[in-house]
Image: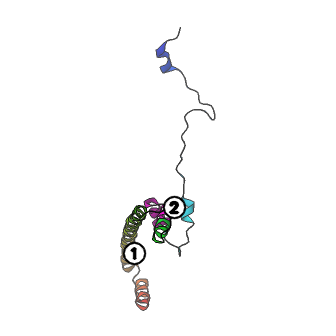
Amino acid sequence: MFLPWFVLWAPQYHFPWSGAVAQQIEPNLSAFFNGIAPQSGDKDIERQAFDVASYGKQLGWLTEVVLGQLGRAGVDADAVEDALKGLEDTHQKIEALKLRKLKADMDRIGVLLETMKRDRPKEYALLARRLQDQA
C-alpha cells in the first residue's frame, strides 16, 4: 500500500551526472575584451559599449546608412532613418560612458597625488616638474 505522505521522508540519491542541472548559456566574452591592446582602446569601455549595442548591430546600422545614401535597392528611407537614430543614440551613450570613466580616473589620480604629496613630497615634486615640462 502506497502512502502519499511517505514521499516527504523518502531518501533522494544523486549519482554522478544525475540530479538538478544548471547551465549558463550566456557567453563569457571576458577573454575577448581582455585581448584588446591598451593602445587600441580601453577594454572596460569596449565591454560597456558592447552592452549598449553589439558590434554586429553597429555594423548593420552603418551598412544601412551607407547603402541608403548610395541609393542602393533594398534599403528604404525609413530603415536609413532608424539606423541613423540607433547610431546617434549609441554614440551618446558611449560618450557618456567615456566621460563617466574619465571622471572616475581623475578622482582616483587626485587621491593618489594627494597621498604622494603627503607621504613622499620629494617624489611628488619630481613628478610635478615632469608634468610641468610636458605641458
Query: On residue 109, which mark appears?
Result: 1
Tell me where residue 43 appears, x and y as whole percent: 50, 67
- Residue type indicated by callout 2: Gly
> Does the magenta-highlighted stretch encompass residue 88?
no
- Residue type indicated by callout 1: Ile
| Near-viewer residue (130 or 80) | 80
Q: Is residue 23 above or below residue 13?
A: below
What segment is highlighted magenta in the picture?
A: 43-61
Which quadrant: the C terminus? bottom left
- Snapshot quadrant of residue 79: bottom left
| Near-viewer residue (19 or 28) | 28
What is the distance, in whole Å, between disc 1 and disc 2 at their CAs?
35 Å
Q: Is residue 27 left or right of residue 16?
A: left
Secondary structure beneath dot 2 equals helix
Q: Is residue 121 above or below residue 60?
A: below
- Which residue is situated farthest in the bottom direction here? 133
- Of labels 1 and 2, earlier in sequence is 2
The colour scheme used to paint the residues is: rainbow
Tell me where residue 65 appears, x and y as whole percent: 45, 68
| Near-viewer residue (20 or 61) | 61
Query: What residue sits right under mark 2 in the picture?
Result: 56
Q: Is residue 122 above or below residue 110?
A: below
Q: Residue at x 37, y 74 (%)?
A: 106
